[in-house]
Amino acid sequence: MLLCVAMLLPRLRRAERLQGRIAALRGLTAGQRPVDVPLPQRVARAVGQAVLASGIVKGETLAELQRTVLAAGFRGARAVAVFIGAKVMLMVSLPLAMLPLSAGSAPMLRNLLVAGAAVAGLVLPDMVLRRMKEAHARQVERGLADALDLMVICAEAGLPLEGAVERVAAEMQEANRAVAAEFANVGTELRILSDRRQALQNMGDRTGLESLRRLGGTLAQTLQYGTPLSQALRTLSTELRHETLMRFEARAARLPALLTLPTIAFILPCIFLIVGGPAVLRVLDIAARP
């Protein structure tokens, strides 16, 4: 580990110099940095970039990993490098941390603990990333209907599609950052890509949400056939709110079934104790008499 850190320090210093030059080109002061990245994250990124440069991660696996990282709300190639570096660092550091803790154990048990720590270090980042992906998807679904209402207002005010998307991204920054980030990416792709329908399709492919796919398809049909944008968005917003209400009703309908087991486990024993307790005490009193 010390040798790896010694090899990575020159790369970190080179990255800091490059960030300083970029900050100078952007007009920042000499003491400022665009993003204050913590040291563990920089080390993980350097390790991940070294792993990616070695070619260990193949094309299909790397593409799937990039899709998962994008679905979790992280953007850019650095996120993949940080994720891979975190896996490698945890896979190495957890077994090393387990060795002193299992010093007094049997050799077989110690080997099992070290191997289990290595497997945990390899699997734990995947579990965390999956949870973050699910949380990001829930947050996007929670704020998508409000974003569509804002788009309706922007469309009725006369803004084009690109301007409406960017305005929604700016207005939703404080209310729902996940929706704001998705709409900001869509606005950037709408201005960069030659095919605007591809940019709208990428909106649903990044997160894998059906609601965003429907939104992208609706906007693409609006661009293709010239249908009114505000009417299509208003209809889609109403459908999304109705689906959200149906999900709440379905969760509420599951509540009696979920309460059955706690009722049996905690309430019924108390009822039996209150109802049958005096009778049991009376029987014990009669049995104890000579």
Image: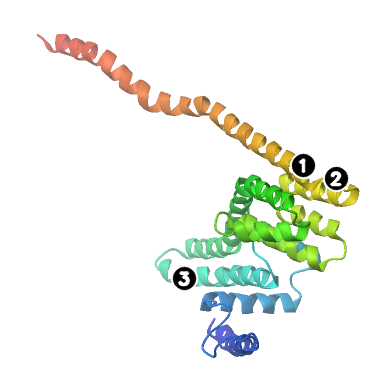
Q: Can residue 169 be seen by looking at this rendering?
A: yes
Per the image, label 2 sits on a secondary structure element best described as loop
- For disc 2, the marked residue is 227
The amino acid type, in three-letter code, at marker 2 is: Thr
Q: Quadrant of residue 91?
A: bottom right
Residue shown at 46%/27% (left/top)? 259
- For disc 1, the marked residue is 231
Q: Are marks 2 and 1 in contact (CB under 8 Å)?
A: yes
The amino acid type, in three-letter code, at marker 3 is: Ala
Residue 182 in picture, x, y percent from top left: 68, 58
In screen coordinates, is 277 left or right of 57?
left
* Above or below: residue 192 compared with residue 213: below
Residue shown at 69%/76% (left/top)? 51
How far, Cα to Cα, is label 2 from label 1? 8 Å
| Quarter of the image that includes the C terminus | top left
- For disc 3, the marked residue is 97
Q: Residues within 10 Å of mark 1 (few under 14, many from 20)?
A: few
How far, Cα to Cα, is label 3 from label 2? 62 Å
The amino acid type, in three-letter code, at marker 1 is: Gln
In this orientation, which residue lies closer to the viewer: 216 or 290?
216
Q: Nearer the viewer, mark 1 or mark 3?
A: 1
Q: Can residue 67 be seen by looking at this rendering?
A: no
Residue lying furthest right: 225
On residue 106, the disc is none
